Image (cartoon, helix red, strand yellow):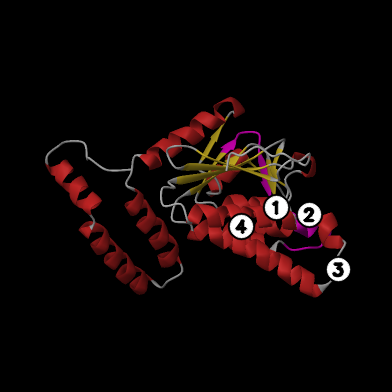
Amino acid sequence: MTDSNTSNTPELLLHERDARGVHRLTLNNPTSFNTLSEAMLTALQEALNAIAQDDQARVVVLGAAGRAFCAGHNLKEMRAQPELAYYQKLFAQCSRVMMAIQKLPVPVMARVQGLATAAGCQLVAQCDLAVSVDTATFGVNGIDVGLFCATPSVPLVRNMHAKQAMEMLLTGGFISAAEAQSRGLVNRVCPASALDAQVEDMVQSILAKPREAVRLGKALFYQQREMGIEAAYQLAGQTMACNMMDAVAQEGVQAFIEKRTPSWRA
């Protein structure tokens, strides 16, 4: 994952993993504002599939190179193939990438250093967590070219209030990082100089918790959100019961009773 690229063509997606199990994915096509081309989507899918097989993975940090985080789909690529079957395949491919983020057993954190628009904003919304520089802007402005951002609307409306999401979708207007935070799209906003420190602070907080409890919690969070309240409580209760039977929870509760720090394995 850290092998150097021997060709003259830069890798579209950089993938590094440290000894703690922190995977860092970097969209690496700044000249196209890191658009989600077919090749970029394929690279993301392959990386997410690999991380899903890593039993020692703990956190994924998804960032980007250059001035923009991600400017959405590659419109030139899309315009070159005006066929319904092609568009259906492309958007299905993108949706699989978004669902792969949700299905990963570890948290995925967006590290937003610049513009995130259309499917790029969707990518931020789909991540479990997001930290942004205070100069970043966010939008779902496909409507400006006559294309309602239907797929970006899916995670967007699950992050913010419906009317806030609808305003962005219908007007194509952009919001600031501060507005994105107040609306629930990002967790933290900071100056560019503090971005990596803020990301690392959140990473460390997650690493300090048991992997199994995080895995159970993430899966439950998304499952119950789509259920009626009674079914959600049933699933949540069963999840907590199973979690409580796990050795890490037993140790955590015992440590609380004994007023000491839990002794957890990574």
The magenta region covers 132-148
Q: Is residue 158 visible?
A: no
Residue at mark 4 to residue at mark 1: CA–CA distance: 9 Å
x and y, in percent, of residue 51 in the image: 51, 52
Q: CA distance from mark 2 to mark 3?
A: 13 Å
Circles 2 and 1 in contact, beta carbons < 8 Å: yes
Of badges 2 and 1, nearer the viewer stands 1
Return the residue at label 1.
Answer: 40
**What's the residue type where badge 1 is placed?**
Met
Please report whichever mark, 2 or 3, sits nearer to the chain's N-terminal start. Answer: 2
- For mark 3, does the 10 Å Cα neighbourhood hold few (<14), some (14 to 19), or many (20 or more) residues? few
Whole-angstrom CA distance, mark 3 to mark 1, is 20 Å
Instruction: Check disc 2 and give the amino acid type.
Output: Asn
**Counting other residues with Cα less than 10 Å from the Cα at mark 1, is it few (<14), some (14-19), or many (20 or more)?**
many
Quarter holding the N terminus? top right
- The mark nearer the N terminus, 4 or 1, is 1
Residue farthest to the top, as pictured: 193
Q: Earlier along the polypeptide chain: callout 2 or callout 1?
A: 1
Q: Residue at x 54, y 51 (%)?
A: 127
Q: Residue at x 59, y 59 (%)?
A: 98
Element type at mark 4: helix
Task: Evaluate whether residue 245 shows in this view.
Answer: yes
Q: Are marks 2 and 3 in contact (CB under 8 Å)?
A: no
Q: Is residue 191 above or below residue 219?
A: above
* The stretch drawn in magenta includes residue 145: yes
The residues bearing labels 3 and 4 have C-alpha atoms spaced at a distance of 24 Å
Disc 3 residue type (three-letter) = Pro
Circle 4 sits on which residue?
Answer: 45
Q: What residue did someone put label 3 on? A: 82
Asked which quadrant contains residue 141, the reply is: bottom right
Label drawn at residue 74: 2
